[in-house]
Amino acid sequence: MSSVTQRNVGLIQRKNVGGSENSDPDVQNADHRHIEEDEIDHDSKETRLTLMEEVLLLGLKDREGYTSFWNDCISSGLRGCILVELGLRGRIELEKAGMRRRSLLTRKIICKSDTPTGDVLLDEALKHIKETDPTESIQTWVEYLSGETWNPLKLKYQLRNVRERLAKNLVEKGVCTTEKQNFLLFDMTTHPLTDAVVKQKVIKRVQDAVLSRWTNNPQRMDKRLLALIYLAHASDVLENAFAPLSDDDYEVAMKRVPTCHFLFSLSLSLFLSLSLSLSPF
């Protein structure tokens, strides 16, 4: 059976034939760059999505409106998105590595600014991080926010119904709609895709990053896009962005994913450090 390659809004597709003000200049700079980057990458009239919303959008089935029942990674992956998004917006940072050069996963997260982001999930997580003493590591916070802890005193940090809340955000932004589907024994709220262009553009950005615009220089790769690729892979939804590719492009893209992981590790300390910068450095 032969394959036909089509382009839809620049997307490679294959189908078979047959809040309050803050005086912290770093926070203001991060917020400004967050908006500025979106306006550069997207038309100002287009929908702007957070990392969490983009990862969930990649995981949602277009017509069915729900994620795969077999995906047990997306829950913790979305919590990781929340932490990175807070870092990109200048709200949290990693403690300094120190003389022993500790690994990224063991370094503690510190609240840099409690200025509200305007996103309910982000602000809820930020509140937990600010109020926690002693501070905790990235890995521990992913566990706390996911509710995966044996310590009953830490269950209060769990972010509940994250997927449903993010899906409602997508509905409010006109990307998805809300429906009720019957699955024999129970009814489930689903969120089928209504604006395919938004999802296609997210997929195209991911495809281009590992193909036509590929660079193994972390200084030249867009940090938010690099984070999206890493977090999509950690959430087990990256395959959905690569599935429409031709066999040759798919093979190239998958070979470059491990390099993206390495580049993301190099950049993570910049996401959550005192030298936070969203512009090329």
Image (spheres, rainbow, N blue to C red):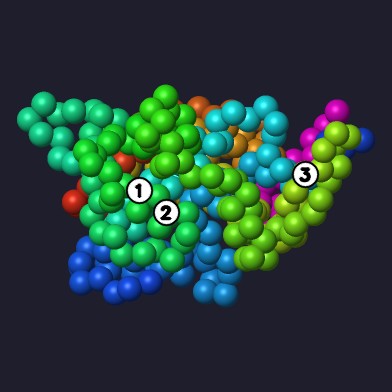
What's the residue type where badge 2 is placed? Glu
Q: 152 or 226, which lies in front?
A: 152
Task: Report the magenta residues as a range.
Answer: 1-15
- Identified by mark 1, the residue type is His
How far apart marks 2 and 1 lie (CA) works out to 7 Å
The residue at which mark 2 appears reads as 124
Mark 1 crowdedness (10 Å alpha carbons): few <14, some 14-19, many ≥20 = some
Which residue is under mark 3?
Answer: 188
Question: Where in the figure is residue 203, as x and y percent of width and height?
Answer: 60, 48
Q: Quadrant of residue 141?
A: top left
Mark 3 or mark 2: whose residue is earlier in sequence: 2
Prevalent SS, magenta region: strand
Residue 4 visible from this viewpoint = no
Circle 1 — which element?
helix
Q: Are marks 2 and 1 in contact (CB under 8 Å)?
A: yes
Nearest the camera: 210 or 232? 232
**Relative image position of residue 36 (x, y in whole percent):** 39, 69
Q: Amino acid at mark 3?
A: Met
- Residue at 35% from the left image edge and 53% from the top image edge: 127
Query: Between 37 and 271, which is closer to the camera in this rendering?
Result: 271
